[in-house]
Image (cartoon, rainbow, N blue to C red):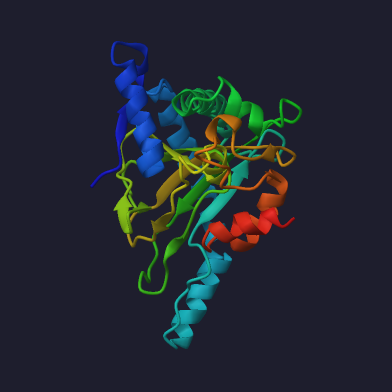
Amino acid sequence: MAIPVIDFSKLDGKERAETMARIANGCEEWGFFQLVNHGIPVELLERVKKVCSECYRLREERFRGSKPVQLLDKLVKEGDGQRLDNVDWEDVFVLQDDNEWPSNPPDFEETMKEYREEIRKLAEKMMEIMDQNLGFEKGCIKKAFSGDGQHPPFFGTKVSHYPPCPRLDLVKGLRAHTDAGGVILLFQDDQVGGLQMLKDGQWIDVQPLPNAIVINTGDQIEVLSNGRYKSAWHRVLATSHGNRRSIASFYNPSPKATIAPAAAATKEAAPALYPRFLFGDYMDVYVKQKYEPKEPRFEAVRAI
């Protein structure tokens, strides 16, 4: 079983209806799918790979002295049979419009600004497609994420590397979780695998596919759709070979946005299954319960 791969360029031709249906199926049945021919230039994606890999090489020494490496060294020395279950084997930093970015390599900032602009546009196109497939007014999801246009949505890009791990018997990788926010667009490594998503109780590889963009839906899309689109559990397995690169962009609500099932998703036959809450309050709960079942998060935020 493989997650769906969808040719995004076919939205503009005779196969539009079929492509819309395939995206709807990806959202409803999987919560994960891959887009090819998505319109982001391959030349830009190649530059993104290059600057992110170069950036990690400049950070590599820092990872060697990081908490996960130190804890693993300690476990190996003590040899008491414990595993490193509560730490992620990951080097990571986040890019936002208003935070400090790496100054090296010299072309990192220019390349990543260009990439973020392209991936933001793709996220907004994807949200409009979800609006249409869900029977929402055009712009409904974007409007909800911006608190009716009062607050800019959050848009962050997480640049991660998962270096080779010498003790796979002691380390998981990136722990299983759902994403708290809205629409996630991942440009993953096309050589080193490890990303898996959970479907029907089975972990399935999100197969590396050159220059594809992986889409997954977060908890807030689940709420707005009143459960029609579920956020999917996913994880990254550590590997003993290769340094996995992962560039995930998150189009999330503003912390001040009020999120609740959209009016078009609730009728007499389908009452609201989720509470109304501020996304900032949800994030306060999520950071404490990220790796635990998601249903209690909604109950906790209902009580705020």
Looking at this view, is 240 or 145 the one in front?
Answer: 145
Residue 51 image position (x, y, % from top left) = 49, 36
Residue 278 image position (x, y, % from top left) = 72, 44
For the point 55% across and 19% down, which residue is it? 138
Residue 32 image position (x, y, % from top left) = 39, 41
Looking at this view, is 180 or 235 the one in front?
Answer: 180
Residue 178, visible in the rendered structure: yes
Residue 189, visible in the rendered structure: no
Q: Which quadrant of the structure image shows residue 172?
A: bottom left
Question: Across the whole image, how many numbered discs are drawn on residues?
Answer: 0
For the point 47% across and 84% down, which residue is it? 77
Residue 177 located left or right of residue 35: right
Looking at this view, is 100 or 61 the one in front?
Answer: 100
- Rendered view: 97 above or below 19: below
Q: Quadrant of the C terminus?
A: bottom right
Q: Which quadrant of the structure image shows residue 96?
A: top right
Looking at this view, is 269 or 43 the one in front?
Answer: 269
- Rendered view: 83 above or below 205: below
For the point 33% across and 59% down, which residue is it? 201
- Furthest residue in direction front, as rendered: 268
Q: Which quadrant of the structure image shows residue 285?
A: bottom right
Residue 68 image position (x, y, % from top left) = 53, 67
